[in-house]
Amino acid sequence: MTGLGAPGPLTGALVGLACGLGVWLVLWRIGARRITLDDRLAPYLRPRARTSRLLVESPTVTPFPTLERLVAPMIGDAARLLERLGSSGRSIRQRLNQSGSTMTLEQFRSEQVVWGSVGLAVGLFLALTVGFIRGFSFLPLMLLVALSALIGAFARDRALTAAVRAREERMIAEFPAVAELLALAVGAGEGPVAALDRVARSTRGELSDELSRTLADARSGAPLARALERMAQRTSLPSIARFTEGVSVALERGTPLADVLRAQAHDARDAGRRALVETGGRKEVLMMVPVVFLILPVTVVFAIFPGLVVLRVGL
């Protein structure tokens, strides 16, 4: 095992430059956080809530409120940097709604900063380990640390996308059964709202949760067609959008709702079968890879090797 050895002039210059840049950034941020005249006058000019502090929920989300208040400005700066470099806030909000999460955009950005910090710590550990063992130069190690932090923040974004995709798959799998239950309830003489309530109470799953939210919108005063439209916007699934549109048209034109729901369930099952056939076709192509590159060469070797041995013995 070899050490780093004596640092060269270039390495010393880079270390000094990095330290000087860090000190300058710290001083710059301290100066930027000075209380301005607007901040001093804001409590006297802006309307203040008259609610008692005992009834106001605490904004802290960790068991260390003092540390959270100290770190919150830095997390906010990092969140704004991620807003400029990564996914937009509109995309994040849309995917949060599609995933069924109650998390806000600010909370998601804070989690991204935490994931990036974990990646930064892992990258720093790897850089120190590689530096002491292999003796790499300073610049590649710093690039490794920065890349690890970016990968950590990007991984949280990808995790949200994976959660959205998994939830949509569960909703597509639940949709035919839910549509048939709604058709049975409406065919038995119940109204649309009562049928939605019965199905939402008797089933469990992601689609049942969306039906409960739709019922809450309808009971709060919104028309049922508008509540179903909001459900289609939250899910962003073509099958759910066709379902809500069909129910809305049936309610407006007086079409028998049970027949519409049965047709929707039949179409959903046909779409599920087509998706299953397409998935099987893709898997079949992927299965050809080990067959062609692993099993077939071994079979050819086993078939040819005895003949080669006989020819060698005959010679």
Image: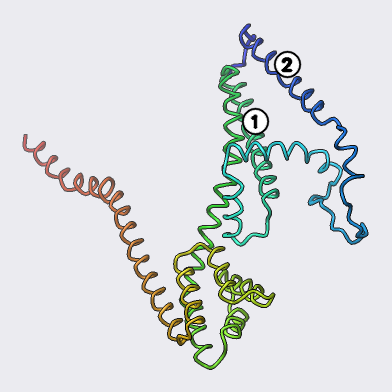
Question: Tag count in the figure?
Answer: 2
Residue 144 vertical placement versus 38 (above, below):
above
Residue 111: percent from left, percent from top: 67, 46
- Crowd class of label 2 (few under 14; some 14 to 19; many from 20; radius 10 Å): few
Amino acid at the residue labelled 2? Gly
Residue 48: percent from left, percent from top: 89, 52
Q: Please, what secondary structure does the residue beneath circle 2 have?
A: helix
Q: Nearer the viewer, mark 1 or mark 2?
A: 2
Label located before the other in sequence (1 or 2): 2
Residue shown at the point (59%, 34%) measured from the top left? 148
Residue 44: percent from left, percent from top: 92, 44
Q: Which residue is mark 1?
A: 125
The disc placed on residue 113 is: none
Residue 287 vertical placement versus 40 (above, below):
below
In this rendering, position of residue 170 left or right of residue 297: right
Amino acid at the residue labelled 1? Phe
Quarter occupied by the N terminus: top right
Residue shown at the point (23%, 45%) measured from the top left? 297
Q: Which residue is mark 2?
A: 20
